[in-house]
């Protein structure tokens, strides 16, 4: 199975490490930073606490096709990192590591996604990679709007 890698990072100057980690570890904020065209919904019961083994169920539409997705928290090290893996969903593999670190310029949030798709490289190049890039670009723009308000 061929896997692909997507990496991105973003720096936030006005928040503490703890504030940024708390924002990302609240599952309900995922619906806020996900593009509206995906119609993402967290299905009840939403977890009240994140930890290794927590499973989260979602419903979304990908290119108009309804999809159920379940992810599991597989690493949990507040306030520096956590990881989630797809247990059921559209990918052959999805492993997303979130990292948080303090620098002189602010809090750096990093994302590393290792994924595999049905159809391998052609499907990835034509559909999946452009979708992932658009989703994370939307997320980055939305975070720029939202995170400065955490302290103000």
Image: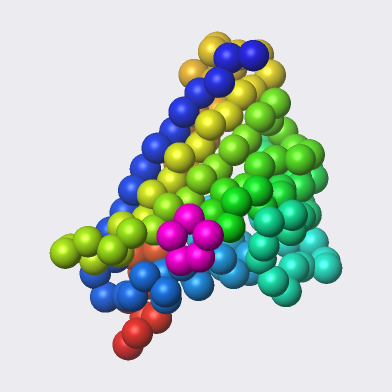
Q: Quadrant of the N terminus?
A: top right
Q: Quadrant of the C terminus?
A: bottom left
Q: Report x, y in % for residue 42.
A: 73, 61
Which residue is located at x 71 percent, y 50 percent? 72
Which residue is located at x 48 percent, y 55 percent? 81
Which residue is located at x 71 percent, y 48 percent? 71
Instruction: Name the magenta segment's main secondary structure.
Output: loop
Is residue 80 found inside the magenta-colored segment of the image? yes
Figure quadrant of residue 12: bottom left
**Relative to 114, 118 lies left or right:** right
Q: How is the image coloured?
A: rainbow
Query: Residue most toward the bottom?
Result: 152
Q: Report x, y in % for residue 57.
A: 78, 54
In front of the other: 22 or 42: 22
Query: Residue most toward the right?
Result: 45
Which residue is located at x 66 percent, y 52 percent? 73
- Give the answer, above or below, for where 143 lies relative to 120: below
Q: Report x, y in % for residue 34.
A: 55, 55
In front of the other: 32 or 65: 32
- Provide the residue span drawn in magenta: 77-81
- Give the answer, above or below, for where 25 lies relative to 131: below
How many numbered markers are drawn?
0
- Give the answer, above or below, for where 59 lies relative to 42: above
In front of the other: 62 or 100: 100
* Residue 80 in view (yes/no): yes
Is residue 59 found inside the magenta-colored segment of the image? no
Q: Report x, y in % for residue 143.
A: 40, 63
């Amino acid at each position: 199975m061929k896997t692909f890698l997507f990496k991105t990072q973003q720096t936030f100057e006005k928040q503490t490490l703890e504030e940024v980690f708390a924002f990302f570890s609240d599952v309900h904020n995922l619906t806020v930073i996900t593009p509206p065209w995906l119609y993402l919904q967290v299905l009840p019961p939403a977890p009240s606490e994140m930890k290794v083994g927590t499973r989260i169920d979602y419903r979304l539409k990908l290119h108009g096709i309804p999809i159920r997705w379940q992810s599991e928290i597989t690493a949990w090290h507040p306030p520096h990192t956590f990881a989630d893996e797809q247990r059921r969903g559209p990918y052959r593999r999805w492993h997303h590591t979130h990292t948080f670190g303090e620098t002189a310029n602010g809090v750096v949030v990093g994302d590393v996604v290792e994924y595999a798709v049905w159809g391998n490289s052609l499907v990835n190049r034509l559909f999946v990679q452009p979708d992932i890039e658009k989703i994370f670009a939307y997320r980055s723009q939305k975070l720029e709007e939202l995170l400065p308000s955490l302290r103000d």
